[in-house]
Structures are given as structure tokens and as C-alpha cells.
Image (tube, grey):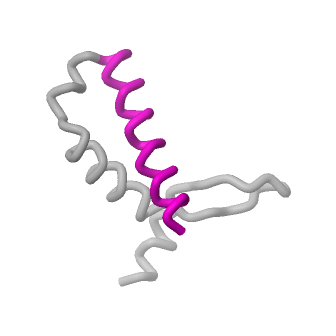
Amino acid sequence: MQNVISDKIRDIQTDYNLITTEVPDFRQFSLREYSEMRMMVCSRIFGISIEGVKTDGFVAYADMLNH
């Protein structure tokens, strides 16, 4: 489990570095702020299969079922 967490932290850091390299104005957000925003979005994504291909998607009506 520790490897999964370490991998996720590394992925977030890598993505943040890429974004701030390509979009320097994004540096106004700290890595912590980016991580928090990313987790808010990720918590709303559902894994789905479309024509046999696994993917992720925002499914607003399915998300409302949690409430």
C-alpha cells in the first residue's frame, strides 16, 4: 500500500512540474493547493467501460446518488 501512495504523490508532483513548466502563471498555486484541487476533482470521477475500453468520466447524475 505504501508504494501506491508514494507512486500517487510522485505522479502529482510530476504533473505539477509539467503544468508549471508549460504554464508559468500556474505557479501562483502551490503544490499543496494543486494537490487539494486535484483530489477534489478525482473524487468525482467514475471508472466506466465504453465499448470494452476502460476509461474515467465525470458523471454528474451518478455523483448525485451519493447525496
In the rendering, at what x and y percent does residue 46 appear? Answer: 56, 64
Q: Considering only vertical position in the picture, is 48 above or below 65?
A: above
Residue under the point 48% across and 70% down = 61
In the image, residue 8 lies in the stretch drawn in magenta = yes
Q: Considering only vertical position in the picture, is 19 above or below 55?
A: above
Would residue 26 appear left or right of 14 to someone viewing this image? left
Of 46 and 32, the residue lying toward us: 32
Give the magenta-colored segment's residue range: 1-23
In the rendering, at what x and y percent does residue 36 appear? Answer: 26, 53
Q: Quadrant of the C terminus?
A: bottom left
Outermost residue on the left side: it is 28
Total tally of numbered discs in the picture: 0
Of 17 and 61, the residue lying toward us: 17
Residue under the point 54% across and 60% down = 4
Q: Main SS of the magenta segment? A: helix
In the rendering, at what x and y percent does residue 30 appear? Answer: 19, 37
Of 47 and 19, the residue lying toward us: 19
The quadrant in which residue 27 appears is top left
Q: Considering only vertical position in the picture, is 1 above or below 58?
A: below
Of 52 and 62, the residue lying toward us: 52
Would residue 46 appear left or right of 12 to someone viewing this image? right
Outermost residue on the front side: it is 2
In the image, residue 52 lies in the stretch drawn in magenta = no
Q: Quadrant of the N terminus?
A: bottom right
Residue under the point 24% across and 26% down = 26
Residue under the point 49% across and 64% down = 2
